[in-house]
Amino acid sequence: MPRTVAGKRAAFRALHESGCFMLPNPWDVGSARYLETLGFKALATTSSGFAWSKGRADNHVTRDLVLAHLREIVEATGLPVNADFENGFGATPDEVAHSVRLAVETGVAGLSIEDSTGDASAPLFPVDIAVERMKAARRAIDESGGDTLLVGRAENFFAGKPDLDDAIARLKAYSDAGADCLYAPGIKTREQIEAVVKAVAPKPVNLLIGGVSEFTLSDVAAFGVRRVSVGGGLARAAWGGFIRAAQGLADGRFDGFKDAAAGNDLNGIFDERA
């Protein structure tokens, strides 16, 4: 198990060379450490899951809180960690570069940069600006040693602009700008997935499956996908159980505890002496 930052980053890059791996998304130290016990080879943070744990909506957490969270997750596990770094916490290339340097310092093995603006009237950065932001992220990583994997994200399907051709054009531009891995969250059909994989080949593609899917990991591997993340899916599953149990308490019932994990089991998982 690689424990040094350099070792984690090297192991993470190796995972992207062939095959297809699952990249689950913990939202706190406990969920990260539990996922490590299941044999996963890498983890990714989730901006939504972390935001909800802070009682905030997704994309409404400060950069300082996110950086502290990244450092905490990195230090909690021996696995490589890919950072959901939202849109790089900056509109201009210089601002993105500064934020990326700070993220690299946390020890993450990879980080993603979105092309979303947070402005409902213009949800995506124009392609030329988005490319300059990606180039700035690439330079910041290279100036910090170059071993952190850069993921370029086209947010069309999440930003209410589900144009596959535009998403592919953006991903190809981000690849040319230095992204090591490409990602279009929200694509779902085999045809969409294979189109993205073909367009950016030989660069690896991340696929988001955050809910019940007709596909298995083996299926999407056959489509050419290199890694599968679940975004806030695990956090939402946990919140679903909590909400059902809490609503039962509000109604004077205790049946929401029916499928609760046993305390002794959890203590055994997290007891470092075990």
Image (cartoon, helix red, strand yellow):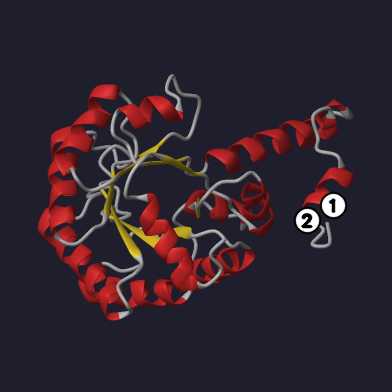
Residue contact at pointers 2 and 1, CB within 8 angstroms: yes
Q: Is residue 257 left or right of residue 230?
A: right
Q: Position of residue 55 (x, y in %)?
A: 61, 54
In percent of width and height, residue 56 lies at 56, 55
Locate the N terminus and report the quarter of the image it occupies: bottom right
Task: Give the Cα separation between the discs numbered 2 and 1.
Answer: 5 Å
Does residue 140 sit above or below 248 in this rendering?
Answer: below
- Asked if residue 86 lies left or right of residue 200, the reply is right
| Count of all numbered marks drawn on residues in the image | 2
Percent of width and height locating residue 94: 24, 77
Kindly identify which residue carries mark 2. 270
Q: Which residue type does callout 1 highlight?
A: Asn
Q: Nearer the viewer, residue 267 or 221?
A: 221
Q: Is residue 217 visible?
A: yes
Which residue: 13% across, 35% down? 165
Residue depicted at x 62% and y 48%:
35
Q: Which residue is drawn at the image coordinates 32% and 49% (left, top)?
A: 17
Please say whether residue 95 is visible from this viewpoint.
Answer: no
Residue 69 in percent (x, y) is at 56, 66
Question: What's the mark number on residue 230?
Answer: none
Figure quadrant of the C terminus: bottom right
Q: Secondary structure at mark 2?
A: helix
Residue at 19% over, 45% down: 202
Mark 1 surroundings: few (<14), some (14-19) or many (≥20) residues within 10 A: few
Of residues 224 and 171, the one nearer the viewer is: 224
Mark 2, Cα crowd under 10 Å, few <14 / some 14-19 / many 20+, is: few
- Amino acid type, mark 2: Phe
Task: In the rendered structure, find residue 267 and report the number of the disc placed on it.
Answer: 1
Q: Is residue 161 left or right of residue 255?
A: left
Q: Quadrant of residue 250?
A: top right
The residue tagged with tag 1: helix, strand or loop? helix
Foreground pick, 211 / 81? 81
